[in-house]
């Protein structure tokens, strides 16, 4: 059972470029959740972290948070859940940095699915992944393939036939539904052509997948009518959930 008054700590710079991603992910929290914020690494940050059920630390670049502070946060959150959300400049930090255990790290593009996982852990619906878990164990826990076919009729459009074929296979789509309720569009190509393809989908909901789903790209796609944009590296469960939400929203607002 989820805590009736979930307490979440958000620690990090409020002016970072990836903050919109973080704010969007926080919308997944229950309405009763209490979110405490701290912009600087001060003594009060450790106190806020220790009092939280879920602590999300936002790191914009690899050495922004010292090893001493990271270890203090890990200790403070021993009774709760801790996530280090990393921005674009941290993409290769895992190769040369060992400050944060791999099991605690998540790229900002994947924060939404990670929050869903952590909420499930707090509710007793998923087993918790310990901070000492290996990189392989962390990958298996967060990127496991959902069982069974997608809940909605989905088709895939991509200029890469191999990628489209593999994504259809992952969705358990042997043949495109006629007509599909949702179209997954690979937008890693000319922007003008992408917009044309979005507008040509008619009544179907549209979900985009992108290699680098940056906030500015997401904004452009939303303006064109795309329901959601998901990173190609995100867990398949996140893409499936986005498709299901897009179809529900499309059905409720057909115009």
Image: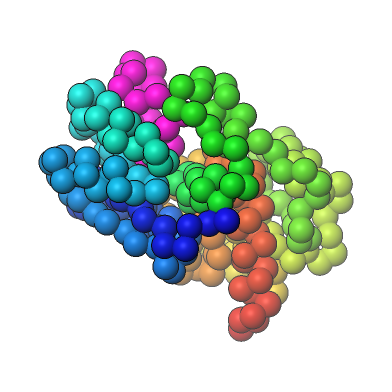
From the viewer's side, name the closer residue of 2 and 241.
Answer: 2
Number of numbered tags placed on the structure image: 0
| Up/down of 227 relative to 253, above or below | above
Is 209 on the left or on the right of 200, as rendered? left
Which picture quadrant has residue 166?
top right
| Up/down of 120 relative to 81, above or below | below
The quadrant of the picture occupied by the N terminus is bottom right
* Place of residue 181 in the rendered image (x, y in percent of width and height, measured from the top left): 74, 66
The quadrant of the picture occupied by the C terminus is bottom right
Q: Which residues are magenta?
A: 84-107
Residue at the top extreme, as displayed:
96
Q: Per the image, is 35 magenta?
A: no
For image coordinates 35% across by 53% down, the residue present is 8
Is 221 on the left or on the right of 146, as rendered? left
For image coordinates 37% across by 34% down, the residue present is 78
* Place of residue 150 in the rendered image (x, y in percent of width and height, measured from the top left): 76, 53
Residue 204 appears in the rendering = yes
For image coordinates 72% across by 43% down, the residue present is 146
Q: Per the image, is 97 magenta?
A: yes
Residue 220 appears in the rendering = no
Q: How is the image coloured?
A: rainbow
Which picture quadrant has residue 20?
bottom left
For image coordinates 24% across by 30% down, the residue present is 72
Which picture quadrant has residue 74?
top left
* Place of residue 21 in the rendered image (x, y in percent of width and height, measured from the top left): 38, 53
Is 165 on the left or on the right of 68, as rendered? right
Is 148 on the left or on the right of 183, as rendered? right
* Place of residue 247 in the rendered image (x, y in percent of width and height, measured from the top left): 67, 68
């Amino acid at each position: 059972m989820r805590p009736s008054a979930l307490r979440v700590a958000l620690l990090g710079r409020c002016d970072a470029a990836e903050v919109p991603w973080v704010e969007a992910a926080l919308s997944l929290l229950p309405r009763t959740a209490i979110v405490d914020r701290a912009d600087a690494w001060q003594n009060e940050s450790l106190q806020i972290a220790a009092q939280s059920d879920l602590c999300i630390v936002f790191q914009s670049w690899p050495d922004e948070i010292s090893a001493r502070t990271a270890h203090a946060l890990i200790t403070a959150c021993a009774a709760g859940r801790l996530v280090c959300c990393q921005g674009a400049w941290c993409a290769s930090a895992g190769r040369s940095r060992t400050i944060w255990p791999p099991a605690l790290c998540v790229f900002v593009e994947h924060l939404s699915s990670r929050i869903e996982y952590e909420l499930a852990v707090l509710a007793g619906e998923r087993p918790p992944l310990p901070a000492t878990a290996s990189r392989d164990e962390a990958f298996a826990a967060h990127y496991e393939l959902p069982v069974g076919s997608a809940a909605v009729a989905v088709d895939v459009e991509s200029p890469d036939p191999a990628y489209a074929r593999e994504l259809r296979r992952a969705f358990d789509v042997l043949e495109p539904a006629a007509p599909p309720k949702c179209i997954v569009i690979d937008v890693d190509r000319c922007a003008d052509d992408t917009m044309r393809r979005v507008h040509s989908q008619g009544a179907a909901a549209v979900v985009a997948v992108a290699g680098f789903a940056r906030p500015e790209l997401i904004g452009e796609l939303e303006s064109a009518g795309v329901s959601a944009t998901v990173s190609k590296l995100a867990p398949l469960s996140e893409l499936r959930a986005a498709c299901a939400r897009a179809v529900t929203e499309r059905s409720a607002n057909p115009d």
